Image (spheres, rainbow, N blue to C red):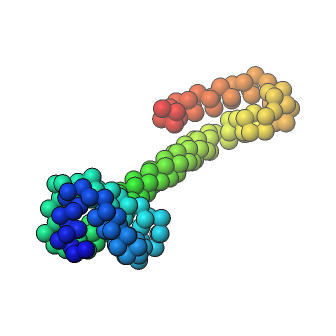
Amino acid sequence: MTDKELKNDLKDGKEIAYKTLFYKYYNWLCNYIYKLSDDYALSEDIVQDIMIKLWENRKTINIESSLKNYLFKSCHNQFLQHIRKEKIKLDFLESLRWDILYDVYSDDDILEAKVNKLHKLINELPPKCKAVFMKSKFEKKKYREIAEDMNISIKTVENQMSKALNYLREHATCLFL
């Protein structure tokens, strides 16, 4: 069967023309796409899609070139379209990946900056005030224990803690917004 006869019979809806076309070009087209993609399943999917489209649109398709050229060009274009879709997916996934990494590292960076700022504020406290605060908050000591350790009254511990907390509250408001 010649190309011209195949085209005419295909337009007329003759299944034998479609089967002839399918068996004549299917493996050839699959191998062509496989060489481009290195994925045999993908190459079969693309060729099958083209063959289905050819059958579904047989009455409206006007093939000026040879059937072989038309099929190879159609498969090639379908493969390029697939690559574009995959690139868009990959670009989206890459963008999403960077957004997530940015969020993770940004949150850690923000937290680290807040902790550093808090440590800086603690270091700005007067020595006795700082010592009382550190023993209370970092060593988890009770006021009575702090008073005994530092040889001061419990009232002095309360006053020093009050000073420390007021200073930190006043200067650290930006940390907790």
Q: Position of residue 82 (x, y in %)?
A: 35, 61
At a point 68% along the width and 29% down the height, the residue shown is: 160
Q: Quadrant of residue 162?
A: top right
- Does residue 132 appear in the picture of this structure? no
Between residues 21 and 100, which one lies in front from this camera angle?
Answer: 21
Q: Position of residue 34 (x, y in %)?
A: 42, 73
Q: Position of residue 39 (x, y in %)?
A: 47, 69
Between residues 27 and 123, which one lies in front from this camera angle?
Answer: 27
At a point 79% along the width and 24% down the height, the residue shown is: 154
Between residues 100 and 110, which one lies in front from this camera angle?
Answer: 100
- Does residue 141 appear in the picture of this structure? yes
Q: Quadrant of residue 114?
A: top right
Q: Quadrant of residue 124?
A: top right
- The image shows residue 77, relative to residue 113, as above or below, that is below
- The image shows residue 93, relative to residue 37, as above or below, that is above
At a point 81% along the width and 28% down the height, the residue shown is: 142
Left or right: 115, with 41 as reference point: right
Name the residue furthest top.
Answer: 155
- The image shows residue 134, relative to residue 8, as above or below, that is above
